[in-house]
Amino acid sequence: MNYPSVKRIMEIKDVDRAAAVKVRAILQLTTVDAVTELSGPALDYVRACYHRPPLQLVKLTAVDAILRTFGVESIPPGHNSRSPAIDYCNSGDTYAATLMWTNGRYRVGSWGDIVERGNYD
């Protein structure tokens, strides 16, 4: 799987190289258990869920603590192929760069730009 580079992750506001390396390392983990071993917030999230959450949400929860964002949010899919579901670390600004999971991959970008061009409710 392709992951954002350390340089690309550093485009997120207030993210230095050390934090970007940690984020990249978490994104490369392959199991929920591996992520929860490294992240207390991810472990708390998994323990609070009745069913085991998807790996991408556990990773985003772990990354949320590193990026100091305001939780993990989701946008359901819209009405056409240009309107994918988006899970993202909430930076507090619709157009600020953040880490997202969309179309089966992690991306750094603005979820507001995707919503503008799509057909969302």
Image: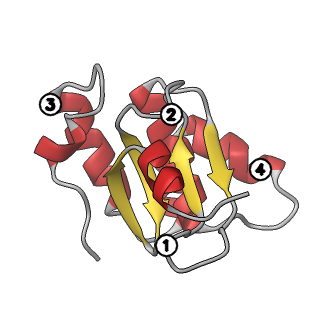
Q: Which of marks 3 and 1 is nearer the N terminus?
A: 3
Please indicate whether residue 53 sits to the left or right of residue 9 in the image: right
Identify residue for label 2: 94
Q: What kind of residue is marked 2?
A: Thr
Q: What kind of residue is marked 3?
A: Arg
Give the distance between the C-alpha atoms of the residues marked 3 and 4, in whole angstroms: 30 Å
Point 38% across, 31% down: residue: 96
Determine the secondary structure under disc 1: loop
Give the distance between the C-alpha atoms of the residues marked 3 and 1, in whole angstroms: 32 Å
Residue 103 vs 67, above or below: the answer is below
In this rendering, which labeled residue sits more in front, label 3 or label 1? 1
**Is disc 4 in contact with disc 1, using a CB cutoff of under 8 Å?**
no
In this rendering, which labeled residue sits more in front, label 4 or label 1? 1
Identify residue for label 1: 82
Determine the secondary structure under disc 3: helix
Q: Earlier in the sequence, mark 3 or mark 4?
A: 3
In this rendering, which labeled residue sits more in front, label 2 or label 4? 2
Give the distance between the C-alpha atoms of the residues marked 2 and 4, in whole angstroms: 29 Å
Identify residue for label 4: 47
Label placed on residue 17: 3
Q: Where is residue 28 in the image (x, y as percent from the top left)?
A: 31, 63
Point 17% across, 45% down: residue: 8
